Image: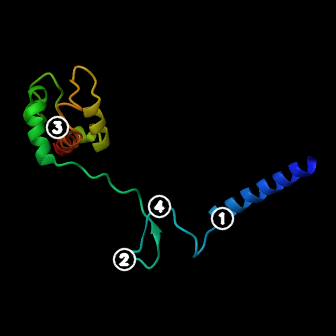
Amino acid sequence: MKRLFVVLVVCGVAALGWGCTKSASSGPGAAASGPVTDQDDSGLKATGAPALAMGDPKHGADVFKANCASCHGEAGAGGGIGPVLKGEKQRKNYPAAIAWIKNPQPPMPKLFPAPLSESDVEDVAAYVESL
């Protein structure tokens, strides 16, 4: 029994060592983390995360006019019970704007998932980011 335990421990340590050695390898044959590119460069390099594609701000303006302007004013300039949205890009980035539109704090009404669809929310967020 003791011998079986020793064999299992040795195998486990060997497996861990092999996995660490494998993942910590570097040099010409080592894989870079993340996507790689070789544009305008002679070697491969890791790139950052891809940018989040924004919705259609033109359609977002139409959705905003129909659903949001009564509180936030024409073009988000204020005039209702909602805050001015000009410059909102300085307070919330695009993903944060989407999250807020989907789950707003009162007194803003929840308009997602109805009457606004996922793409409507993305388009309105893109429009608000453009103000």
**What residue sits right under mark 4 in the picture?**
34
Disc 2 versus disc 4: nearer the observer: 4
Left or right for 13, reference 42: right
Who comes first in sequence, dot 4 or dot 3?
A: 4
Left or right for 100, reference 23: left
Residue 128, percent across and down? 18, 40
**What residue sits right under mark 3 in the picture?**
86
- Could you tell me how far apart the alpha carbons at marks 1 and 4 are, in whole angstroms? 17 Å
Q: Pick the residue in front: 104 or 5.
A: 5
* Contact flag, marks 1 and 2 (Cβ < 8 Å): no
Who comes first in sequence, dot 1 or dot 3?
A: 1
Residue type at numbered disc 2: Asp
Residue shown at 18% from the left, 27% from the top: 83
Disc 4 versus disc 3: nearer the observer: 4
* Contact flag, marks 1 and 3 (Cβ < 8 Å): no
**What residue sits right under mark 2 in the picture?**
40
Residue 73, percent across and down? 9, 30
Left or right for 7, reference 117: right
Residue shown at 21% from the left, 24% from the top: 108
Who comes first in sequence, dot 2 or dot 4?
A: 4
- Could you tell me how far apart the alpha carbons at marks 1 and 3 are, in whole angstroms? 52 Å
Residue type at numbered disc 4: Gly
Disc 1 versus disc 2: nearer the observer: 1
Residue type at numbered disc 1: Lys
Query: Counting other residues with Cα less than 10 Å from the Cα at mark 1, is it few (<14), some (14-19), or many (20 or more)?
Result: few
Q: Secondary structure at mark 3?
A: loop
- Could you tell me how far apart the alpha carbons at marks 3 and 2 are, in whole angstroms? 39 Å
